[in-house]
Image (cartoon, rainbow, N blue to C red):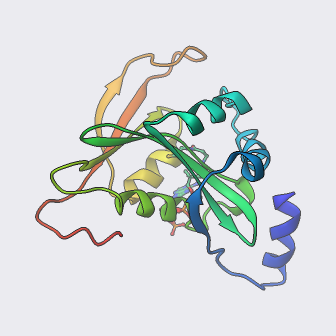
């Protein structure tokens, strides 16, 4: 669905970069398109009940990136006292490299507060080099390796983290 929609526009050079709006996920209208994007996840994709669990969890936030009433990506994160942990972040394959993932991270950075929540962390598969490069580009750094972290593969996981620089004003809002 997405591929057909955007490939044509890109081919005709109607759009060079797709801009998106990041907003809260709502069950009724969003979940179908979110599941379609999540189906591109080849490692243990989430099902509807997983999204519903996080949608209704009081300490979790689910957001979508939307363009022209289409969901292009989503992020799910958990709030801790001093940090935010990204549990899932995915952009539809056909619109990747359009800075939509960057917009999601920027949105999250804008929610951090000096003296309160100052860090964003994410656990990444050792083999997911794309995401490691993406997070590095966002200013994240490796802080820890979790050996043989996953049930489905023997690979390790890396914990990557971004920290609000208390010396600088938060310019990401
Ligand atoms: C990782 C992911 C969220 C990136 O989202 P995106 O919207 O495609 O990324 P952006 O366009 O914002 O990329 C910003 C920068 O990250 C780096 N980057 C992103 N994808 C990359 C890739 N495939 N290879 C190398 N670098 C990449 C680049 O530096 C890029 O800047 P550039 O395009 O100017 O070179 C997306 O590829 C995705 O959903 N992957 C599958 C799910 C996943 O692995 N989730 C974990 C997320 S951390």
Residue 93: % across, % down? 71, 53
Quarter of the image with the C terminus in it: bottom left
Quarter of the image with the N terminus in it: bottom right
Residue 87: % across, % down? 49, 37
User: Which quadrant of the figure has residue 109?
Assistant: bottom left
Q: Nearer the viewer, residue 2 or 78?
A: 78
Q: Is residue 163 above or below residue 102?
A: above
Q: Nearer the viewer, residue 88 or 54?
A: 54
Q: Nearer the viewer, residue 101 or 172?
A: 172
User: Which quadrant of the figure has residue 152?
Assistant: top right
- For this view, does 101 lie left or right of residue 136? right
Which residue is found at the position 62% from the left and 75% from the top? Answer: 19
Which residue is found at the position 60% from the left and 64% from the top? Answer: 97
Q: Is residue 141 above or below residue 1?
A: above
Which residue is found at the position 65% from the left and 60% from the top? Answer: 96
Which residue is found at the position 82% from the left and 78% from the top? Answer: 9
- For this view, does 5 lie left or right of residue 25? right
Residue 25: % across, % down? 62, 51
- For this view, does 133 lie left or right of residue 114? right
Assign ligand 1 to one image quadrant: bottom right
User: Which quadrant of the figure has residue 46?
Assistant: top right
Q: Is residue 19 above or below residue 164?
A: below
Residue 44: % across, % down? 66, 26
């Amino acid at each position: 669905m997405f591929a057909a929609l955007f490939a044509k526009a890109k081919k005709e050079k109607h759009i060079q970069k797709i801009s998106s709006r990041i907003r809260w996920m709502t069950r009724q209208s969003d979940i179908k398109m979110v599941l379609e994007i999540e189906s591109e996840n080849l490692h243990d994709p989430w099902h509807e009940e997983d999204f519903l669990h996080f949608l209704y969890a009081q300490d979790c936030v689910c957001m979508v990136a939307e363009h022209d009433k289409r969901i292009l990506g989503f992020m799910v994160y958990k709030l801790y006292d001093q940090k935010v942990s990204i549990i899932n972040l995915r952009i539809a394959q056909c619109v990747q490299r359009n800075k939509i993932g960057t917009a999601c991270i920027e949105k999250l950075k804008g929610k951090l507060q000096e003296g309160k929540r100052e860090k964003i962390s994410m656990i990444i598969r050792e083999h997911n080099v794309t995401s490691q490069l993406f997070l590095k580009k966002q200013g994240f750094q490796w802080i820890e390796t979790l050996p043989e972290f996953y049930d489905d593969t023997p690979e390790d996981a890396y914990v990557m983290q971004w920290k609000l620089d208390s010396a600088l004003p938060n310019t990401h809002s």
